Structure formats: C-alpha cells, structure tokens
Image (cartoon, helix red, strand yellow):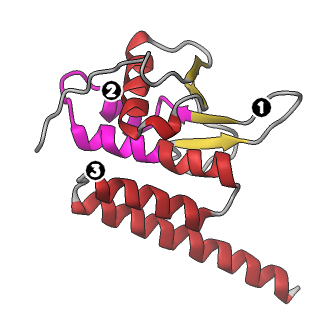
Amino acid sequence: MRTVAVLVLSLAFPSTLHASGSTSQSAAETLESAIFLAGPSIAGLPIVLAPVPPDGASRGVEAWTLPPQDNQAAQIVIYSGSGLFRCASDPDRLDYQCLLKLASTIIHEAWHYRHGVNEAGAYEAQIAFLTFHGAASAQIADARLSRHRVLAAQQAIERRRVDR
C-alpha cells in the first residue's frame, strides 16, 4: 500500500466549497485534499458536502450533480457519509487509493457539471484520471465495471422506451 501525504494549498486551487448541514473540519479538509489532487481544472467549481444522500439515491451513492434550480447555479455534491468519503477521511488509515478514488469521483461529477448527463464521457474522464494517477488496477477495473453497468442500464431503458 502506498501512503502519500497531501498538502492542501487552498490559495493555489480556490473552490467554492460549502458545507451543507453540519460538516466537520476534518470532512472539509478531506474534500479540499481531494480537490487539490483532482487538479486545477476543478478550481472554482461549486462543490458542497452533504451529510445525507438524496431521496431515491442508489445504494452506494458517493456524489451527484444538481442541475440549476430556483435561481441557484448547478452544484457538485459529495456525500460525506459514503464509505468512500469515510475511507478518504480516516486519519488512522491515510489511504492514497481512497483519496484518489474520491478525486476521480469529483472528476466524474465535474464532467457532468460541464457537459451534461452523458455517463460514457464522465466515466471516460474518471478512468483516464485514475490511470494517469497510478490507481490500483482493481480500482480502474471497478470504474470500468461501473461504466458498463450504467451504460447497460441506460440502453435497457432506451430499448423499453422505443418498444412502447
């Protein structure tokens, strides 16, 4: 296991990070570390932490993008109660792979924020990020499997819609 200390330079990569509900300083620091790892293309995006998933969220939800609504801009939301976020923020673990996956999740949601709902493009961006940053092969395989499942589900929905 590779352990890496991540230096957070919030001045170098400003973001519009806001806590939604009660969020600990540790959770905010974890998110800032993941944003820093995700890189300068993420700077300035409206990213918020949420202590609960949205109604109707799938099991295992880690993040989502809210479209613009009621005179508010779109936002990227990171679920601070997810297993991934807890792994990335565990001070006893310091697992680079967890932080890397959290950063890749931000990359995925940033793709949606900029380009819309197309999952193929979002997963391609996420997989490219993981590959470039030396993610474990199991993590890259998991992202590919997730992409396959999501795209297969979308195709099944589309086929049912066409068959009606």
**First in sequence: mark 2 or mark 1?**
1
The answer to whether residue 34 is left or right of residue 2 is right
What secondary structure characterizes most of the magenta part?
helix
Rendered image quadrant of residue 141: bottom left
Identify residue for label 3.
133
**80 within the magenta span:** yes
Marks 2/1: CA–CA distance: 28 Å
Residue 147, position as x, y percentages in the image: 49, 67
Q: Look at label 3 and name its amino acid.
A: His
Q: Which residues are magenta?
A: 78-105
Q: CA distance from mark 3 to mark 2?
A: 19 Å
Q: Position of residue 127 (x, y in %)?
A: 40, 61
Residue under label 2, please give it.
89
Tally of marks: 3
Name the residue rendered at 41%, 69% in the picture: 145
* Residue 125 x/y as whole percent: 48, 58
Report which quarter residue 9 is drawn in: top left
Q: Amino acid at mark 2?
A: Ser
Q: Is residue 38 left or right of residue 2?
A: right
- What's the residue type where badge 1 is placed? Ala
